[in-house]
Image (cartoon, rainbow, N blue to C red):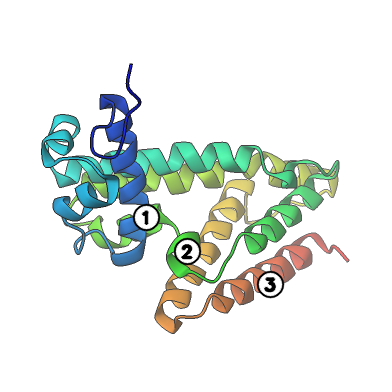
Amino acid sequence: MPRPTKQDPERGAARTRLLEAARDVIRRQGFAATSVDQLCAAAGVTKGAFFHHFKDKAALGVAAADFWGETTGAFFEGAPYHRPADPLERVLAYIAFRRSIIGDELFEFTCLAGTLAQETYESAPEIGAAAGRAIFGHAATLEADIAAAMAARGISGGWTAASLARHTQTVLQGGFVLAKAGQDPQMVHESLDHLERYIRLLFQAA
């Protein structure tokens, strides 16, 4: 059997190529500015292959958000911040890990789900909902460690593990927006530094 190429990919490979192209192109230039033709060119597939897998660009947007959630979920699941025995140290290690994966190219480290949510929450709510699944789903992965850290230190009050987990994503998404506005990845580092200080203060950690 001949191997698939960009000119003649296997049917399943074409869908994955399109989703990977959407991940990169939309993060670079936004959903509205991205055309089906551009996605097909970036993926190396025909427009016929596109419409075989997706009825329209909006359907691609939903699938791309879900693909983002699945692939980044696997990436974070295998990340080293899960290793510390102390749950608070795991939370702080998560912040350090997020800091470590920020590079110089804005589109490479900013969030596809965040980009889609900002652009489509009203114009294409089905895409916004898929983006929300990715963002809130990732936030939920932090809740157990935060709850364990609260229990270990006897902390309770007007906030919950779930609300703090969501706040970490608020800081990250805001940092991504500022980095884009200022064309400066350092903006995300600055936001994460403040997030770390805030969490240390909440838990009175040295």
The residues bearing labels 2 and 3 have C-alpha atoms spaced at a distance of 14 Å
Q: Residue furthest front?
A: 2
Give the mark, 2 or 3, whose residue is nearer the N terminus.
2
Q: Estimate the x, y position of residue 144 in percent, counting from the top left.
A: 67, 39
Q: Residues within 10 Å of mark 1 (few under 14, many from 20)?
A: some
Q: Is residue 156 left or right of residue 62?
A: right
Which label is found at residue 173? 2
Mark 1 to mark 3: distance in Å? Answer: 27 Å
Q: Nearer the viewer, residue 100 or 139?
A: 100
Q: Depth check: 123 or 66 in front?
A: 66
Q: Quadrant of the N terminus?
A: top left
Mark 3: amino acid = Asp
> In terms of sequence position, does the residue under pointer 1 or pointer 3 come before the other?
1
Residue in the picture at 18% in, 45% down: 58
Q: Nearer the viewer, mark 1 or mark 3?
A: 1
> What residue sits right under mark 3 in the picture?
193
Is the residue 186 above or below the residue 166 in the image? below
Residue under numbered circle 1: 24
x, y (%) of residue 75? 58, 41
Seen at 12% across and 35% down, the residue is: 51
**57 horizontally vs 87: left or right:** left
Taking 125 as reference, is 100 above or below it?
below
Q: Earlier in the sequence, mark 1 or mark 2?
A: 1
Q: Amino acid at mark 1?
A: Asp
Q: Where residue 157 sits: x, y (%)? A: 69, 55
Looking at numbered disc 2 in the image, what kind of residue is underneath it? Answer: Gln
Judged from the image, the secondary structure of the residue bearing numbered disc 1 is: helix
Q: Report the quarter where the C terminus lies.
A: bottom right
Secondary structure under tag 3 reads helix
Q: Residue at x 20, y 47 (%)?
A: 40
